[in-house]
């Protein structure tokens, strides 16, 4: 079965075999060597300096990393503006509410790009100043790649720190870590890094960590960062998921880094889009506004999602439904994971057969 959902991904044989390494006690040197390698390789993906950035590992899915980032980095007296144009933006607002963080939301239609004027207006008209802004980089709900650059400038001018959910972009899309507004990016092992679920992480500036607060016990970013820097860990980590993360990161480096992965995904997305276009299946968003990681397509007029999904599953592919109100309108194809051009060819010919 080939997984074309946005994580967990189809593993390469190399990553799959990495799971079969020796059992490790997480209080022994061998585990801390593994943890150190994961942390160092995470910095290397975007060429970050250890003096500026801390890679903090967590055991959990991507949401654990996002929750840890939001709960720690908006201080007690801080105020958060959440930019929402999909399910994952909505999730950040729910996290903020759960932790009783002082927050507001700028809501958009799920097919729309963030409205910079509206965001600037909200920041500037606030009775009480916002200290932080949270945004999804790749909003997996629609495949939209939110433009972080102009938003980061807007934040920098107002001394607002930016917290980014990069769960479905880290490792395959450009991220400008040098921008002074960017304080942290949360992500996971089992999306663009091609490893297994169970390990997630936050890349966070030391300057932001110094001001971190502690609202949660298990997901306490500051504590995790401090202990990991000392070759330590507070709890039992998902050791095998760390094996896979390290192997996924080695493989990413061997394949040419995030830029090569970006190009590979882009070619596959283009190939699928061209194949679908010949069948009258159109993209929900223009390619220029989409990530290379996942594309949303309008369901063909002659077939609903369920028969399309079930027919493709019988042919060996798992595709992904639209979420919420979009479930009746779109389907999604993610090409993250061990997916090759020949797989996309087979996918397109399977759709041809189904619609034929
Ligand atoms: C997948 C995803 C998450 C996290 O989902 P989990 O199921 O917790 O791994 C968060 N944000 C975005 C943008 C995602 O695509």
Image (cartoon, grey):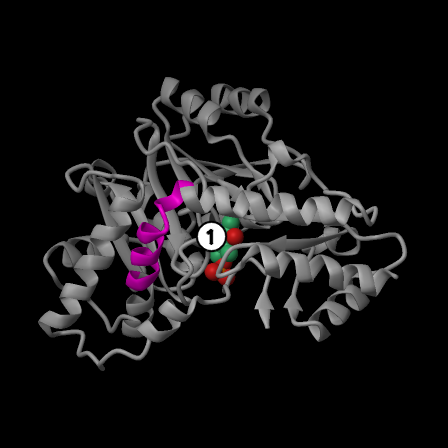
- Left or right side of 168 for 330: right
> Is 236 above or below relative to 146?
below
Q: Which residues are magenta?
A: 246-259
Give yes or no for residue 116 being in the magenta stretch. no
Q: Residues within 10 Å of mark 1 (few under 14, many from 20)?
A: some
Q: Which residue is at the front of the view, 229 or 50?
A: 50
The percent coordinates of residue 253 (x first, y second) are: 31, 50
Q: Which residue is at the front of the view, 288 or 24?
A: 288
The percent coordinates of residue 130 (x first, y second) are: 41, 29
Report the predominant secondary structure element of the magenta stretch: helix
> Is 301 above or below relative to 182?
below
Q: Which residue is mark 1?
A: 95
Q: Is residue 152 something that shows in the picture? A: yes
> Is 124 above or below relative to 57?
above
Q: Which residue is at the front of the view, 304 or 292?
A: 292
The percent coordinates of residue 261 (x first, y second) are: 44, 47
The percent coordinates of residue 312 (x first, y second) are: 72, 68
């Amino acid at each position: 079965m080939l997984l074309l959902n946005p994580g967990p991904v189809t593993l390469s044989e190399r990553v799959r075999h990495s799971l079969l390494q020796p059992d490790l006690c997480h209080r022994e040197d061998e585990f801390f060597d593994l943890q150190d390698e994961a942390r160092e390789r995470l910095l290397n993906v975007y060429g970050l300096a250890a003096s500026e950035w801390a890679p903090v590992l967590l055991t959990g899915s991507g949401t654990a990393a996002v929750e840890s980032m939001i709960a720690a980095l908006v201080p007690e007296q801080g105020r958060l503006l959440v930019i929402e144009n999909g399910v994952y933006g909505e999730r950040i607002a729910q996290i903020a509410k759960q932790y009783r963080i002082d927050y507001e939301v700028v809501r958009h239609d799920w097919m729309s790009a963030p409205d910079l004027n509206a965001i600037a207006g909200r920041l500037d008209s606030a009775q009480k100043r916002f200290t932080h802004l949270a945004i999804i980089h790749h909003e997996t709900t629609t495949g939209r790649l939110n433009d972080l650059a102009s938003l980061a400038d807007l934040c920098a001018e107002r001394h607002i720190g930016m917290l980014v959910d990069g769960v479905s972009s880290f490792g395959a899309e450009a991220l400008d870590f040098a921008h002074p507004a960017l304080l942290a990016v949360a992500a996971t092992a089992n999306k663009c890094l091609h490893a297994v679920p169970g390990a997630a992480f936050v890349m966070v500036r030391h300057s932001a960590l110094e001001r971190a607060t502690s609202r949660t016990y298990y997901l306490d970013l500051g504590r995790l960062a401090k202990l990991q820097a000392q070759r330590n860990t507070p709890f039992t980590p998902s050791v095998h998921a760390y094996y896979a993360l390290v192997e996924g990161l080695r493989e990413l480096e061997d394949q040419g880094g995030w830029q090569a992965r970006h190009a590979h995904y882009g070619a596959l997305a283009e190939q699928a889009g061209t194949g679908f276009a010949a069948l009258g299946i159109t993209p929900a968003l223009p390619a220029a506004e989409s990530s290379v990681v996942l594309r949303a397509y309008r369901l063909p007029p002659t077939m609903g999602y369920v028969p399309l999904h079930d027919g493709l599953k019988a042919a060996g592919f798992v595709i992904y439904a639209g979420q919420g109100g979009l479930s009746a309108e779109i389907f999604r194809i993610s090409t993250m994971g061990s997916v090759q051009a020949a797989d996309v060819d087979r996918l397109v010919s399977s759709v041809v057969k189904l619609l034929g």
